[in-house]
Amino acid sequence: MIKFIISVVVILITGYVVLNYVPFIAKYDHYVIATNSMEPVINVGDVVIIDTGVDLDDLETNQIIAFYADIRGDGKKQVVVHYLDSITEVEGERIFKTRPEISDDID
C-alpha cells in the first residue's frame, strides 16, 4: 500500500513539474469549459488547451481564442473562449471583438 501511495505522489509531482516547467509544454494552459456558449463545437465540461505563446499579430478572424474578461461585472476576470470576430485599430489601439457559437452577438 505504501508503494502505491508513493507511486501516486511521484506521478502527481512529475506531472506538475512537466506541465509547469518544461518549456515546450509550459507554454500551454488548460481550462474546463463551464458554459454552453460554444456548443456544439466545444461542450460544457470539455477541456481546452491554450497556446499562450501565440503572437497577437498572428491572430486571424474566425479563430477560437481564449481571453480574460469581467463577464459578470463583479471586477473578477474569467477566461472566455470564443471566436475572434474582428480586429480593428482605433487611434493606435487594437480592438478585438469576439462572438460565441450560439449567437451572432459580438462581445
Image (tube, rainbow, N blue to C red):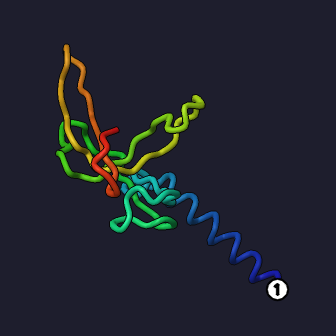
Name the residue at 56% across, 58% down: 17
74 on left or right of 92:
right
Q: Is residue 88 left or right of residue 40?
A: left
For disc 1, the marked residue is 1
Label 1's element?
loop
Vertical position of residue 66 compared to residue 9: above or below:
above
Residue 13 % position (x, y):
63, 63
Q: Which residue is drawn at 18% across and 29% down?
A: 88
Q: Which of 63 and 85 is in front in this view?
A: 85
When the figure is inspected, residue 79 is found, relative to residue 47, above or below; the finding is above
Quarter of the figure with the C terminus: top left
Q: Where is residue 54 in the image (x, y as percent from the top left)?
A: 28, 45
Residue 22 percent location from the top left of the image: 45, 55
Would you identify the image quadrant in which residue 24 lies? bottom left
Q: Which residue is drawn at 46% across and 36% down?
A: 69
Q: Which residue sits at x=40%, y=41%?
A: 67
Mark 1: amino acid: Met
Residue 88's place in the image compared with 41, above or below, is: above
Considering depth in this image, is 59 or 12 the residue closer to the camera?
59
Residue 90, compared with residue 75, is above or below; it is above
The quarter in which the N terminus is drawn is bottom right
Badge 1 local density, few (<14 within 10 Å), some, or many (20+)? Answer: few
